[in-house]
Image (tube, rainbow, N blue to C red):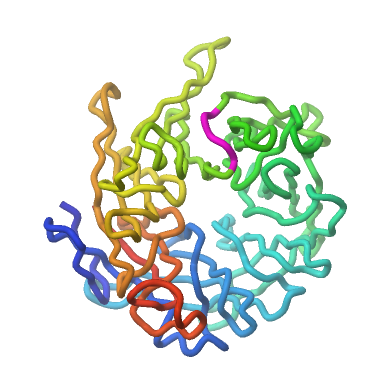
Amino acid sequence: MPAIIGVASVFAAAQASGQTLTSVHKFAGSDGAFTGNRGATPASRMIAGPGGVLYGVTPQGGAINCGTIFALTPPAAAGQKWSFKLLYDFPNMQAGCGPVGPLALGAAGQLYGAAGGGQSHDGVVFELVPPASEDAAWQFQTLHAFTYQGPATTGPGAPVIGANGVLYGTLGSYFDGAVYSLTPPATEGGSWTEALIFTASGVNSSNPAPFGNLLAYPGGLYGVACPGYGETCNLVSLSPPASGTGTWTLSVLLALPYCATCFYPDLVADSSGDLFGASQTFGAGGAGDVFELSPPAAAGQSWTYREVFAFPASCANGCYPSAGVTLDAHGALWGVTTGSIAGVGVVYSLTPPSGGQGSWTYQEAYSFSGGADGGPPGAGLVLGADGGLYGPTESGGGAKDQLFPTFGYSGFGYGTVFGWTP
């Protein structure tokens, strides 16, 4: 049975087992009124850094409602509070607005991310560098501001870090997209170099670009691409040219039984190279599912698809997963949904079968009430240094919501960060 994370406040789960959820932080109350607050409506997966520190973004809140970047440091002892720190408050549209996550953590502790806004309002990729001393401010730098030259040149997605510190991410949307790279300067103080390493040939193209989040692997990138409106998506890989520069090669690895609007492209890989993800509304039960994509066992064979768990239309075990899944140290999958019998989602786990054969075991770990424990969890979970699972809710928290006084659930609020320990 899950144990309680030893932090400040604990909410009783809405289920007979007596399991509990821990509130790590509420974006309300001590954060002040909406004008000048420290963030609102966290909607992206956080990342974990050294010392168990969690880093995340809020697309709203801050001095001009353009969002924030924050850190949460775990307590030194059980029962103490987590420490919240505002790392950056986007001050204007030129710096960026509405950051998207997850952030990427560099080798020296720097954070990389993407946002809307910029000089042309077509999006930016930025770097946030930690200070030399704890009390000093983090330093923000725009690495690249995009300029609209067609549908595939605007709206950067969250970057991932590849070989040699190069950043990769998607541009555009489901069918008109591209993949960008940002190469760090050869000398300190130099400029980053932006390039489009792959561009789709248009709507209903036979050569579509990935959309959403990418997954880096040694020597390439995985993504999800959709050839046209209403058509199913494909698992694709992008491989660099032999010369090291120029256009990358896109390969279709597997057709997926999902369309773009029903699929979350934030895939995760296990140690054997199997990929796991979730769909929002498809699956055998019609209310979303979790699936596994396995690479070929031998040269010349194909990738294979397997449905790990189908959420029932009754929502008896939760329904409509709202993000991808997270692997824990024991090979179990963890995720969240926005639907449930109570109507506001659950935290769930899927334990693999012994020996790799048979069905995975589903367990509903927690059912949200929509009040003080938070509204629907809209982003994936992150595995903390202590083995706990952490995630945000976009609303709720128990304080009066001054931004949307009639919006949300019984608790209102600007959202929360919660924790759960297996």
Question: Can I make out residue 53 in this image?
Answer: no
Of residues 123 and 239, which is closer to you in this image? 123
Of residues 203 and 102, which is closer to you in this image? 203
| 397 on left or right of 275 | left
- Point out residue 295 in the picture as x, y percentages from the top left corner: 50, 22
Which residue range is magenta in the image? 256-260
Residue lying at the far right of the rendered structure: 149
- Point out residue 195 in the picture as x, y percentages from the top left corner: 81, 47
Residue visible at 39% across and 42% down in the picture: 287
* Dominant SS type (magenta): strand
- Point out residue 363 in the picture as x, y percentages from the top left corner: 23, 45
- For residue 204, which quarter of the picture? top right
Is 259 in the magenta? yes
| 116 on left or right of 86 | right
Residue visible at 12% across and 58% down in the picture: 16
- For residue 366, which quarter of the picture? bottom left
- Point out residue 39 in the picture as x, y percentages from the top left corner: 52, 77
Residue visible at 72% across and 56% down in the picture: 155
Of residues 352 and 313, which is closer to you in this image? 313
Question: Can I make out residue 74 in this image?
Answer: yes
Residue visible at 59% across and 34% down in the picture: 218
Is 96 in the magenta? no
Residue 102 lies, with reference to residue 7, above or below; the image says above
